[in-house]
Image (cartoon, rainbow, N blue to C red):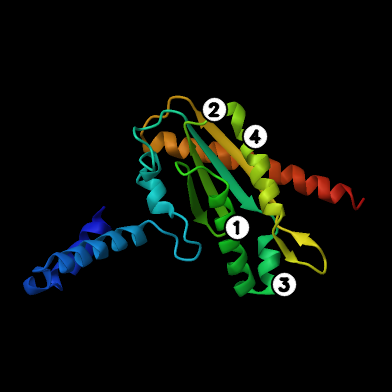
Amino acid sequence: EKEIVKAVLEIISRTSDHLLETPIQQQNFFALLNETQRKLYEDELTGVYNRRYLNEFLFLQHKNSKIPEKLTIIFMDLQNFKLINDTYGHLIGDKLLKNIAQTLVANVRTQDSVIRFGGDEFIIILTNCTEDHIQYKIDKLKARLYAICYDTKSNLHITANFGYSHSNKFILSDAMLQTMIQKADSMMYNEKKLAKKSLNSTFI
């Protein structure tokens, strides 16, 4: 919120009184404020939410009429993304990240949030979702991501590892949020190790 206050104060300090005289000028001013706030919580490359949005718990208010108690955190990491960057270049890598982010957003509900956690890691937050629905959602996301082919000649598709944590009684606290993220990350890492082990066994 400090960043928002700074941005607002900067905009106001650069705005003369006569520029806010008409309703249209006032409307433009508030539109600028809204755009500034939006950019504070948006990942610049992919257009999904950023870590500030996560750390400030804004996902709890996103399209929800009241603070949800049921909360699911899905942690996703792309397989071999560094190899894609090294082989095809960072421009292709950036294009893929945008495509992946758009695919994730298109396959979750409006009250859910897609956050770029860093690099090729994303967090998907599901609100008011029952635990027995989570694996179905993950399988759906895996299938949608696999439909993205980044090398048509070699028929190479995007694959990802997933892990999740779920709470029926989420408490608004940094400690609980970090615990849930770590649990989802650990589950994702275990899936990655199993996938790597399985891949290596095919070449023995």
Q: Are marks 1 and 2 in contact (CB under 8 Å)?
A: no
Closer to the camera in the image, 179 or 43: 43
Residue type, numbered disc 4: Gln
- Label 4 to label 2: alpha-carbon separation: 10 Å
- At mark 2, the secondary structure is loop
- Label 4 to label 3: alpha-carbon separation: 32 Å
- Residue 156 appears in which quarter of the rendering? bottom right
Residue 148 point in image, percent of width and height: 69, 59
- Label 2 to label 3: alpha-carbon separation: 40 Å
Residue displayed at 44% across by 41% down: 111
Task: Specify which label sits upstream in the sequence, 1 or 4.
Answer: 1
Task: Specify which label sits upstream in the sequence, 2 or 3.
Answer: 3
Residue type, numbered disc 3: Thr
Residue position for label 4: 135
- Label 1 to label 4: alpha-carbon separation: 19 Å
Front position among marks 4 and 3: 4
Above or below 135: residue 102: below
Q: From where the camera sits, is residue 189 visible?
A: no
- Label 1 to label 2: alpha-carbon separation: 25 Å
Query: How many C-alpha atoms fall within 10 Å of the one at disc 3: few (<14), some, or many (≥20)?
Result: few
Task: Specify which label sits upstream in the sequence, 4 or 3.
Answer: 3
Residue 169 point in image, percent of width and height: 43, 25
Residue 168 point in image, percent of width and height: 47, 25
Task: Specify which label sits upstream in the sequence, 4 or 2.
Answer: 2
- Label annotation for residue 130: 2
Residue position for label 1: 100
Residue type, numbered disc 1: Ile
